[in-house]
């Protein structure tokens, strides 16, 4: 059981690292999401924790990850 919890927690941290940080670096500084990035990180961390299994393909494949990041960024910017 400990291995499953460790794998789940590790995948969650890697997903935060590969999704949240690159998108935040590309956002304009005057965007409200960038200005509230700590609250956005907390909300994203909670939501990502619930859907770790479904985001595994985005974590493992670079093409899917880039497509997901672009879509996530467009969603944050409201495009």
Image: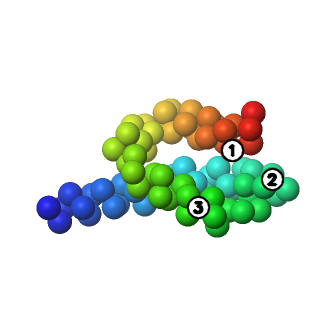
> Can you tell which quarter of the image residue 59 is in?
top left
Q: Residue at x 43, y 60 (%)?
A: 13
Q: Residue reaching furthest right?
A: 30
The image's mark for residue 76 is 1
- The local crowd at label 1, few if under 14, some if 14 to 19, many if 20 or more residues have their Cα within 10 Å, is some
Q: Circles 2 and 3: CB distance less than 8 Å?
A: no
Q: Which residue is mark 2?
A: 31
Position of residue 39 relative to residue 77, above or below, is below
Q: CA distance from mark 1 to mark 3?
A: 12 Å
Residue 60 placement, left or right of 24? left
Q: Secondary structure at mark 1?
A: helix
What is the quadrant of residue 10 in the picture? bottom left
Give the labeled residue for mark 3. 41
Tag 2 and tag 1, C-beta contact below 8 Å: yes
Instruction: State how far apart marks 2 and 3 are (Cα).
Output: 15 Å
Residue occupying the far left of the picture = 1
Determine the residue positioned at 20% across, 57% down.
4
Place of residue 31 in the rendered image (x, y in percent of width and height, measured from the top left): 80, 53
| Quadrant including the C terminus | top right
Front residue of 37 and 11: 37
Are the residues at dot 1 and dot 3 in contact (C-beta closer than 8 Å)? no
Q: From the viewer's side, name the closer residue of 50 and 11.
A: 50
Q: Residue at x 50, y 32 (%)?
A: 63
Give residue 13's mark.
none
């Amino acid at each position: 059981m400990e291995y499953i919890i460790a794998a789940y927690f590790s995948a969650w941290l890697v997903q935060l690292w590969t999704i949240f940080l690159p998108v935040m670096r590309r956002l304009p500084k005057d965007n409200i999401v960038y200005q509230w990035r700590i609250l956005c990180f907390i909300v994203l961390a909670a939501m990502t924790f619930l859907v770790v299994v479904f985001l595994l393909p985005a974590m493992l494949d670079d093409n899917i990850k880039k497509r997901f990041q672009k879509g996530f960024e467009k969603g944050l910017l409201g495009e």
